[in-house]
Image (spheres, rainbow, N blue to C red):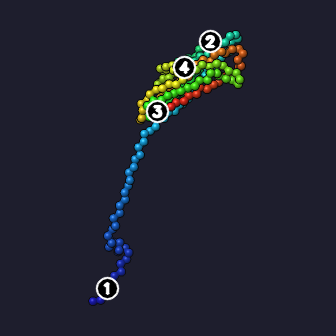
Amino acid sequence: MPFRSFALSPAVLLVVLPALAQSAAVDVDVTLYTPGASCTITLTNDLDFGAAEKPATGSGSITINAQTGSRSSSGIVVSGTSTVGQVRLVGQHTSSYTMSRSFPTKLTKGTSSLDFTGAWSESSSANSGYSSISTSSYSGTAGGAGTSFTHHFRFGGQVSGITWSDGDGGYAGSIATSASCN
């Protein structure tokens, strides 16, 4: 009997050969961290005493109550609108915080100046319940990790020693604020 040979095409070889098994592993990772305490100060209103008419004799003063925002004057006539200064402190993952302020002692216009005595207050509400703060810093507590808080601070004070000899124009200064959250 004669010998017969067969030639297999590559397609047939694939069918004839057993399939090779393949595998792959997918890793699963998660990174945990403790969020750090953070806080931000946002300006809501600048402190504005309005306009004051210089007294013909003697001296006068203007006061804005930091708790109520009301304006009063002594020895001078004031006009225009006034606003109490206000900032909002917002924080996250905070257990405690400290808000600090530094008041200028003078409001200036060029080389001229007026005496300024600052006052501030705090509240958990933007519009009511303000309590006077007698020190240069205020410390409070918050809910800790996973929580957020908002606290409000108002700034007022008194501009005093206004006389006829003071130069006309706007007098200005800055109240510096800073906060730390833990």
Q: Secondary structure at mark 3?
A: loop
Question: Mark 3: few, some, or many residues within 10 Å (few <14, many ≥20)?
Answer: some
Q: Nearer the viewer, mark 2 or mark 3?
A: 3
Q: Earlier in the sequence, mark 2 or mark 3?
A: 2
Q: Secondary structure at mark 1?
A: loop
**x 53%, y 21%: residue:** 135
| Disc 2 from disc 3: Cα separation | 43 Å
In the image, residue 9 above or below residue 136: below
User: Which residue lies under the disc numbered 2?
Assistant: 74
Q: Amino acid at mark 1?
A: Arg
Residue 12, quarter of picture: bottom left
| C-beta proximity under 8 Å, tags 2 and 4 | no
User: Which residue lies under the disc numbered 1?
Assistant: 4
Q: Nearer the viewer, mark 4 or mark 3?
A: 3
| Disc 4 from disc 1: Cα separation | 111 Å
Instruction: Point out residue 33 in the picture as x, y percentages from the top left corner.
Output: 42, 42
**x 46%, y 25%: residue:** 124
**Which quadrant would the N terminus be assigned to in this image?**
bottom left
| Disc 2 from disc 4: Cα separation | 17 Å
User: Which residue lies under the disc numbered 3?
Assistant: 182
| C-beta proximity under 8 Å, tags 4 and 3 | no
Q: Nearer the viewer, mark 4 or mark 1?
A: 4
| Disc 1 from disc 2: Cα separation | 126 Å
Q: Earlier in the sequence, mark 4 or mark 3?
A: 4
| Disc 1 from disc 3: Cα separation | 90 Å
Q: Amino acid at mark 4?
A: Ala
User: Which residue lies under the disc numbered 4?
Assistant: 66
Instruction: Point out residue 150 in the picture as x, y percentages from the top left corner.
Output: 47, 29
Q: Earlier in the sequence, mark 2 or mark 4?
A: 4
